[in-house]
């Protein structure tokens, strides 16, 4: 134990030395910032940072030490940039950053009595999400495809679209992520709906009469444990769960059943044969509220972004260091392939924060500079 105390004392001594060196380094960083301010030089010089990191890494031979030393200097550089941005108040000149500033300048108030589109028909979980978010003030309209919902918002046929973006059991709804990147829309809210699938069929049907089960592919997947007990049933994927219920009701065929919500059974006059067919009792879907214009509703505390990165080592780590140095809580990171770019990816990243916070301007500018492409998708009230 005395030996451990000695080691700790040695570390304390070294830490005091490091602290003094850190203070000296930051003093020079401030002078560099003043120099850049007077001459209009950008805070971030990516080529210079890569050169410095390579020089530092070359100082050690052990590969593990080299990686750790590089990580330490990356964080030091991130801290240095943050200090300089406070001095310089740098802004403008980056497409992603400038686009965000324009969107903030054009924010609108929430639309009263809005027209809201969702994918599916009445009784869909997406319709339930509309009701959760807007209550009874909206006119909710079902459309056939996710892209139809985006197009309706973009073309002014609807004020908002409510779309599922991820499920706690089956993960991301990838098509919605891709369409979020394709269409120039903004996320202005989110809500969650607990999923409780039910097996339903026309009056007179029993488990013994059923030969075909209809549902969205996710509804079938989320109910696979239940369906595996009935291997003779033919599983038929549909565009949405409620649409499956609507179809089965229209046929009146007791050999057909649907897996969808209890609300769909009520709307279409079907009898519920089994409740809770999904194997995860805590199955929840997260929905986003999409608008053609950015909104900043009261209490907005989550920021959603999408970006691509330079195809070089350490590019994602540099993004992560920005969040670590600024104490930002990242809540979501999802990658999606970039269409037309083999083995290149877009990243969807969400974190807690407000676009109106004084320190956020510099953070957004640094994120825009560090990425190849950058876009803020919205700032909204977290529902999670």
Image (spheres, grey):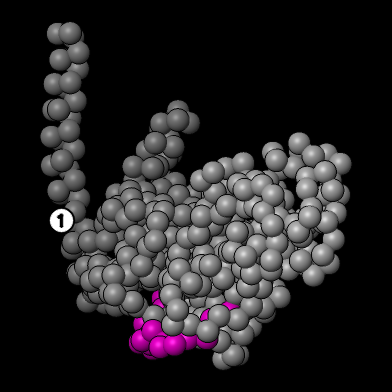
Numbered disc 1: secondary structure: helix
- Res 238 visible: no
Q: Which residue is pictured at 47% across the width and 60% down the height?
A: 192
For mark 1, does the 10 Å Cα neighbourhood hold few (<14), some (14 to 19), or many (20 or more) residues?
Answer: few
- In the picture provided, is 35 more to the left or to the right than 186? left
Instruction: Name, please, the residue furthest toward the bottom.
Output: 156
Quarter of the picture holding the C terminus: bottom left
Q: Which residue is pictured at 46% across the width and 54% down the height?
A: 332
Q: Which residue is pictured at 17% across the width and 33% down the height?
A: 15
Q: Which residue is mark 1?
A: 27
Q: Residue 246's spot in the image, x, y percent? A: 73, 68
- In the picture provided, is 357 more to the left or to the right than 169? left
| Residue 261 to residue 147: above or below | above
Is 275 magenta? The answer is: no
Quarter of the picture holding the N terminus: top left
Is 108 magenta? The answer is: yes
- In the picture provided, is 127 more to the left or to the right than 147? left
Q: Which residues are magenta?
A: 93-117
Q: Nearer the viewer, residue 119 or 46?
A: 119
Q: Residue 74's spot in the image, x, y percent? A: 36, 49
| Residue 124 to residue 153: above or below | above
Q: Which residue is pictured at 69% across the width and 49% down the height?
A: 273
- In the picture provided, is 341 more to the left or to the right than 313? right
- Res 360 visible: yes
Q: Residue 135's spot in the image, x, y percent? A: 43, 75
| Residue 55 to residue 293: above or below | above
Q: Residue 322's spot in the image, x, y percent? A: 36, 56
Q: Nearer the viewer, residue 119 or 334?
A: 119
Q: Nearer the viewer, residue 225 or 322?
A: 225
Q: Nearer the viewer, residue 359 or 252?
A: 252
């Amino acid at each position: 134990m005395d030996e451990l105390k000695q080691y700790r004392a040695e570390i304390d001594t070294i830490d005091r030395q490091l602290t003094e060196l850190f203070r000296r380094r930051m003093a020079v960083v401030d002078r560099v910032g003043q120099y850049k301010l007077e001459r209009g030089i950008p805070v971030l010089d990516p080529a210079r940072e890569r050169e410095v990191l390579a020089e530092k890494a070359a100082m050690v031979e052990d590969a593990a030490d080299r990686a750790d030393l590089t990580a330490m200097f990356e964080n030091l550089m991130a801290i240095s940039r943050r200090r300089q941005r406070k001095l310089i108040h740098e802004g403008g000149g980056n497409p992603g950053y400038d686009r965000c500033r324009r969107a903030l300048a054009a924010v609108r108030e929430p639309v009263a009595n809005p027209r809201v589109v969702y994918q599916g028909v009445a009784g869909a979980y997406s319709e339930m999400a509309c009701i959760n978010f807007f209550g009874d003030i909206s006119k909710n309209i079902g459309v056939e495809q996710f892209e139809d919902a985006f197009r309706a918002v973009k073309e002014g046929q609807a004020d908002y679209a409510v779309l599922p973006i991820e499920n706690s059991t089956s993960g991301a709804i990838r098509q919605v992520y891709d369409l979020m990147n394709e269409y120039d829309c903004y996320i202005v809210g989110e809500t969650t709906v607990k999923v409780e699938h039910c097996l339903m069929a026309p009056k007179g049907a029993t488990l013994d009469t059923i030969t075909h089960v209809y549902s969205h592919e996710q509804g079938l997947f989320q109910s696979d444990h239940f369906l595996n007990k009935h291997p003779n049933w033919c599983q038929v994927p549909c565009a949405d769960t409620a649409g499956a219920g609507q179809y089965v009701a229209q046929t009146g065929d007791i050999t057909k059943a649907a897996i969808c919500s209890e609300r769909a059974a009520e709307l279409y006059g079907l009898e519920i044969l089994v409740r809770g067919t999904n194997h995860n009792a805590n199955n929840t879907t997260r929905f986003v509220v999409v608008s053609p214009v950015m909104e900043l509703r009261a209490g907005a505390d989550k920021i959603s972004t999408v970006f691509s990165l330079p195809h070089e080592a350490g590019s994602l780590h540099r993004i992560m260091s920005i969040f670590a140095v600024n104490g930002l809580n990242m809540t979501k990171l999802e990658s999606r392939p970039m269409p037309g770019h083999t083995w290149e990816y877009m990243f969807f990243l969400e974190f807690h924060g407000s676009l109106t916070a004084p320190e956020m301007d510099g953070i957004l500018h640094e994120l825009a500079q560090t990425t190849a492409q950058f876009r803020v998708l919205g700032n909204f009230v977290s529902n999670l």
